Amino acid sequence: MNTHTTSITSRTAGLLGEVLRPGDAGYDQARALWNGAVDRRPAFIVRCRSTREVAAAVRFAADNGLLLAVKGGGHSIPGWSVCEGGLVIDLSPMKAVHVDAQRLIATAEPGLLLQEYDAATQAHGLASPGGEISHTGVAGLTLGGGLGWLSRKHGLACDNLIEAEVVLADGAIVVANERDNAELFWALRGGGGNFGVVTRFSFRLHPVAPMYAGFVMYPAAQAPEVLAHYEQLTRSAPDELSLMTALVSAPPAPFVPPALHFQPVIGIAACYVGPVEEGQQVLQGVRSFGQPAVDTFGVQPYTAIQQWFDAGVPHGLHYHCRSEWLDPLDSDALDALAQAAADRTSPLSQVLVRHMGGATSRVDPTATAFRFRSVRHILTVAAAWEPGDERAEVHRQWCRDAWNRLRRGRRAAAT
Ligand SMILES: Cc1cc2nc3c(=O)[nH]c(=O)nc-3n(C[C@H](O)[C@H](O)[C@H](O)COP(=O)(O)OP(=O)(O)OC[C@H]3O[C@@H](n4cnc5c(N)ncnc54)[C@H](O)[C@@H]3O)c2cc1C
């Protein structure tokens, strides 16, 4: 904490909401992020319950020259939602959600996690696109774009944003939509959290019934063939078919044969956002490849699909992640993916590839701040390790090396 910050920590006039300072009960919990490697100590954490309290916190930070960070679901991987010194606006108490099932619109406050938002919308048989891990925040995910199981059919989370209420840097409260504050509305859809504090989101909803969905898993030795199969499936995938492949360690789950527990595996996960009978037919193409050691396919509610992989990326581990758009996914890229997984230095680390396209690619790239509309796949290389692991730098380096190799291949392919 710098001297300037120290001199104002005793003055909180103008701040509304619950204010936490170092040493207060709940302070450490409120500053913790999903990524346990991020350890920052703000001077103030203001747990806001309303737009008015957010506006007061923004003005307080501006008046006192304080660095300001905004925390929604706390899943910023580099930790942008908590600052060292300065003031954190913690939006987690703001969790109201209202579903208008007639007009197909959901109004959501920015402290909601996907699992809370999905539960409220699915109670009406409706949903709007989110991500694949249900403990991620609706706010940060939407502001960054937001890609998940429903995206090839219904677009990114930000493509379904109809309106947002925003507290600007001077504390003014505005509404942004296609008509009012249209430039701000453009920036909020994929531009990240840099344009103000969003205190209310309105999303377009879609009917989403239980779907045919699941995943298959194979020992990692079969990675080259399974990756090639994944790539082949994506070539002819209809918009309803959502696919990803993951190179991970098998969990000790009841559906995994004991011999594979904790062993390196490759999986293909898929769901069909459409009629179950159609899904059964289309997904036969996924299930019939080779002899999967695990096959979980069946009819599943969207809320269950959204939570499949939650336990694989728990809060508090230390993470170092890199992402890249992959296009094309040619044989060099497939080799590099298999090699990256084989070289993992921690059994908790993961290599993931998700298929994009479909509705996400049919939005004009200039219509929103999210401009990566023509990309076919997104890669995530995620290094993960237990707190206190002395090989932390080795794990980080694995992540950087794998990512660099995959990026080099991509550049070479593009020239
Ligand atoms: C385990 C995991 C799984 C993920 N899976 C997916 C996925 O499937 N699809 C996908 O698209 N992305 C995914 N992501 C990326 C994720 O969408 C981003 O990390 C997102 O920013 C997290 O949002 P949050 O609200 O949880 O995080 P936070 O850390 O709270 O916020 C992230 C950023 O948004 C800003 N912000 C948060 N709330 C507001 C607000 N109300 N107004 C203005 N700015 C705000 C913060 O200041 C910060 O810069 C995943 C991330 C993790 C860690």
Image (tube, helix red, strand yellow):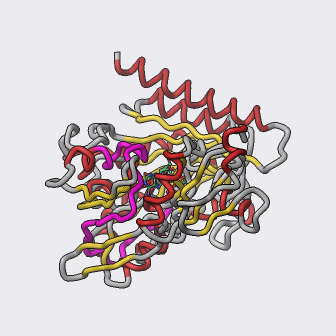
User: In the current view of this chain or complex, which residue is farthest to the top?
Assistant: 415
What residue range appears in magenta? 187-215
Name the residue nearer the viewer: 48 or 316. Answer: 48
Does 390 lie within the magenta span?
A: no
One can see residue 145 in this view: yes
Q: Is residue 3 left or right of residue 358?
A: right
Q: Quadrant of the C terminus?
A: top left
Does 211 lie within the magenta span?
A: yes
Name the residue nearer the viewer: 168 or 362. Answer: 168
Question: Residue 2 at x, y = what percent?
Answer: 71, 38
Residue shown at the point (22%, 75%) measured from the top left: 104
One can see residue 222 in this view: no
Question: Residue 163 at x, y = what percent?
Answer: 25, 61
Q: Is residue 328 above or below residue 49?
A: above
Classify residue 1 by image quadrant.
top right
Residue shown at the point (78%, 50%) measured from the top left: 386
Name the residue nearer the viewer: 208 or 115. Answer: 115
Q: Is residue 54 above or below residue 404?
A: below
Residue shown at the point (76%, 68%) measured from the top left: 25
